[in-house]
Amino acid sequence: MIAVTSTPEHHDRIIPLSKHDTRPLTLRDVSEASGVSEMTVSRVLRNRGDVSDTTRKRVLAAAKTLGYVPNKIAGALASQRVNLVAVIIPSMSNMVFPEVMTGISEALDETDLQPVVGVTGYRPEKEEKVLYEMLSWRPSGVIIAGMDHSDAARAMLRASGIPVVEIMDVDGTAIDSVVGISHRRAGSQMAKAIIKAGYRRIAFLGTKMPLDHRARKRFEGFTETLAKAGIEIEDREFYSGGSALKKGREMTRDVLARSPDLDFIYYSNDLIGAGGLLYLTEQGVDIPGQVGLAGFNGVDLIKGLPRELATMDSCRQEIGRRAADLIVTRAASVDGQGAPSRIVLEPTLTYGDTLRRH
């Protein structure tokens, strides 16, 4: 809840109150917070009627701070939920997320609940927009990728009054329930395997960290473990855009041109790792003797390569299934509430043909 006060200069300030109310928010809450009538709040949120710019800004600021989302279910349905589960993911082109969706769909198949998907493109502002629209239809639950959200997105999720499950990651403070793996631990485990295999001149190639939070956490765990062993990353390169074989080939070529003495390359995902593997194979490089390689995610594609890329399974399908199971259980309860759950899965390291076994 929030309150509105006025300074001596008569400017409105929105002040969060200390007590957090978990019930779904109403127009009255926004009315009280902004200091205008419920009818005025309704006109502002529906973009109807003649309302001054000052009042409109005050209402919108109060609604955003509260995390209020209008209810689009009219009439007799207004107090109920629809049998939809909002699933919010960053990408459908990334091979990781279709497997997550498979797990979610399998868990919901025998229920009345249906998943509806929103894609954010890894952009916080797009996540806010998708979340706002989905919550306005009052779904029975939300499954959302990652634990790194804007303040506005977190406010909407907390104020929704429905089960929320953050997935794919457990390194952070959960809004409600969470199902995933520790990416920092995954990066650390890969570093330990590389060190034990005798590699010392190591490069990291991956996506730009401000957008891909999970890759950033793996990189942090990876470099911290190397540092404890007295090893510094010799080279690194980050890129924006989708994971692609072509990008992996180009990045591998460029990093070896800069640092020809490298003996290991760790990729943030399997697709760019597969591109690197194809490039080095064409160049006649001895793998894993001269240069070792590893990716992340354990996608099926790498099993069809001339050599199997070392990788770590990110438990994608199980994460989707376990998250959906939590939503089903909570939605079936009398009030849709329940104790939050924290489910941490352990990824499996596969050495393949590109990482020497110590």
Image (cartoon, rainbow, N blue to C red):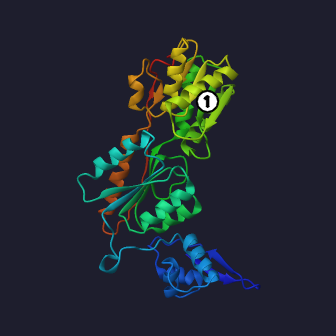
**Image location of residue 283, percent across then percent down:** 55, 14
For the residue pair 40 and 326, the one nearer the viewer reads as: 40
Residue type at the position of mark 1: Phe
Image vertical order of residue 194 relative to residue 287, above or below: below
The residue sitting at 51% across, 55% down in the picture is: 174
The residue sitting at 30% across, 68% down in the picture is: 334
Image vertical order of residue 29 relative to residue 231, above or below: below
Question: Where is the N terminus found, in terms of image quarters?
Answer: bottom right
The residue sitting at 51% across, 85% down in the picture is: 49
Describe residue 77's horizontal placement relative to residue 236 as left or right: left
**Image location of residue 168, percent across then percent down:** 46, 45
What residue did someone put label 1 on?
204
Neighbours of disc 1 within 10 Å: few (<14), some (14-19), many (20+): many
Describe residue 147's horizontal placement relative to residue 4 as left or right: left
**Image location of residue 148, percent across then percent down:** 55, 52
For the residue pair 238 and 265, the one nearer the viewer reads as: 238
Mark 1 residue element? strand
Residue 102 seen from this side: yes
Picture quarter containing residue 4?
bottom right
For the residue pair 160 and 240, the one nearer the viewer reads as: 240
Image vertical order of residue 168 relative to residue 34, above or below: above
Residue 345 seen from this side: no
Describe residue 94's horizontal placement relative to residue 321 as left or right: right
